[in-house]
Image: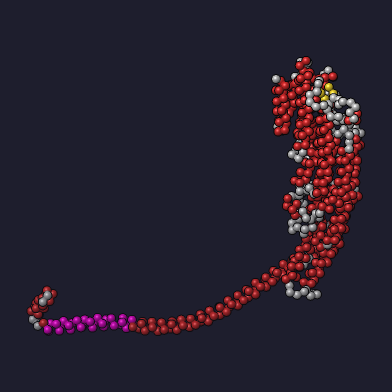
Amino acid sequence: MNGGAVDIAAALAEITQKERVDIGTYCDRMITQADHALDEQAAVQQPALKALAEQVRTSRTSLATIRQQLEQFSAQLTTASTNIQKLQDRSHSLSDQLAQQQAEASELAQWLETCVVPPSVVRLLRDTPVEKDLHGWVHAAHTIETCLQSLNEYEAKQNDVAKGGTARAQANAVAEQSKYLAITKIYPYLLSLFEPIRTSVTTTLPILQFSVLLPHNQPLYEFLAMHAPRIAAEVQLAYINAARLYYETAFRRYTRELQRILQRWTEPSVLVADAPRHPEGLFALDRLQYAQPTASATALMAYQGEDTHFHASPEHVFHTLAWVFFDTACSEYAFLARFFAGVGMKKTWAPDAAMPTESMLSLSEDEAQEHKAIVTRETWRQVMEPAMQAFADFRKSMLALPHVPLLSHLTMVTLTQELMRVAQARHCLVPELESALMQHVLETWPLVAKALDTEVDAMKHLSVGPRQGPPPPRTGLLELWGAVTASSTDLTRSGHTSQALLHIVTAYAHMYRAIAQLSSSEHEGMLMAGLTRIHAEMARLLREYATNTYPSHKDGTPPDALCMQIHDALAAHTNDTLTTEAAAWRQLAEQLRT
């Protein structure tokens, strides 16, 4: 037996001994007591258990009721969900129909806006002259153009032809009638704008072109060019005739007055060899400014021809006419390229936008490319032919003038070549303009070459004492026949050899500097060849002076000093040609000094 059982057995033995009963009886009595205690406890808890059981039965009944209600509610939810889905489908269908109707309404509104000419535009075309409301007419032209384009695009998408009485047919009819009505009123209006050009030369044509015609009326011409090309061609022809008459009258009057001014100019053609006799006859270097195509030089006015005391140099007169002719040619080309383009009405139009002055005389690179194949050379030639003829006649009369100095011719030919460069930069160098300018260059260069030869021949006829080198060329009739020997002018006969050489040296340096300043890459070779020949003759004279005269007349200017005078006159400039020439004279001075 384990320890627990021993203890229980000991305890039972003690209790039975104390109670004087056996173990079985004691155990039965205790069991009975325990049963009575449980019965009493059960009796006490029985009401609570009955209540709990009642609650369980009630809860089961409630749960059954709730379950039934939930089943009913679930059925109702299923029905409601079905109805909601139907409503949603209906709503989506209505939304699609509404969106389709809105799209159709928007398309219809856009069609009405772009394809139907507004009543206000129709009333304007019918009741208002163009000159009374120019901006309104330009807007109307844009509106009609937009309507016609939209109608054409719309009809191209349709599978059938618009039937009479339909909105499509009515819109097409109104647009076409509006177009023809606009054409019939724009045509005489544009012709009337050219009337001031045809009737009076006091009208400033560039102002009319770039302040009236181009910014305000060019859209109307574009409208004609798009929808009535033949009428637009008549407008262009009317302008050509009016502008041609204007330029013919203006340039004829202007060149006549310039001829008067030119005839008053008297100037001896002083050669370098003639400097001792005409020391004051040097070409004024400020006249070289007329070789540059700038407006800074004072332009000659026509009224100055009436002043019998007013005179101007040939290159000044030529500069004025060439500059006026050149600017007129560029301005006219720029206007023709822009106004008569006829490439379609621009979407943007700014009638109040000011055009810069430089734009009146040139085209941008984009404009030049855009209008290159539109404005024909023939149109420009027809307009500018009288001006080109007047310019050609005037320049020929200038070339025929006797005793024009070499530097004067060279100044004018340099100006002409510079004008061609400017025209190219302006994108206005049409072949006819280039030909008109180049013709002057081609006809002037022989005169320049002849003048250089004359300078060389005159220098060859000079000597200082016994001549060094070959004799001068024979030019006289008797010399060519061999009747007399070639003659030369001996500067020692004047008794003032040093002074004469000083004048010649001064004139030589003056001429050399001026020619070098006017020289350019195109004709530098020919000019330098002539100057080299004159240089050789000038060096010969100084060597003759150093050998024949100066040793016996020490009171005169030393030969090396004369060379250094040329050097000092040329070395003051940064021109490479002058620097090289100055170095050559310094070298000769050193040779003569030793």
**Quarter where residue 532 is shown:** top right
How are the residues colored?
secondary structure
Q: Is residue 17 above or below residue 190?
A: below
Q: Is residue 273 visible?
A: no
State which quarter of the image contains the C terminus. top right
Q: Is residue 111 above or below residue 384?
A: below
Q: Residue at x 75, y 70 (%)?
A: 155
**Quarter where residue 552 is shown:** top right
State which quarter of the image contains the N terminus. bottom left
Q: Is residue 432 visible?
A: yes
- Residue 79 falls within the magenta-colored stretch: no
Q: Residue at x 71, y 23 (%)?
A: 591
What range of the chain is rendered magenta?
Answer: 24-52
270 relative position to 53: left or right: right
- The one of 468 and 309 positioned closer to us in this rendering: 468
Furthest residue toward front: 482
- Residue 29 falls within the magenta-colored stretch: yes
Question: Residue 142 in the image: x percent, y percent?
Answer: 78, 60
83 relative position to 353: left or right: left
Q: Residue at x 67, y 70 (%)?
A: 103
Q: Label the magenta part by its dominant secondary structure.
A: helix
- The one of 166 and 48 positioned closer to us in this rendering: 166
How many discs appear? 0
Q: Residue at x 87, y 55 (%)?
A: 237
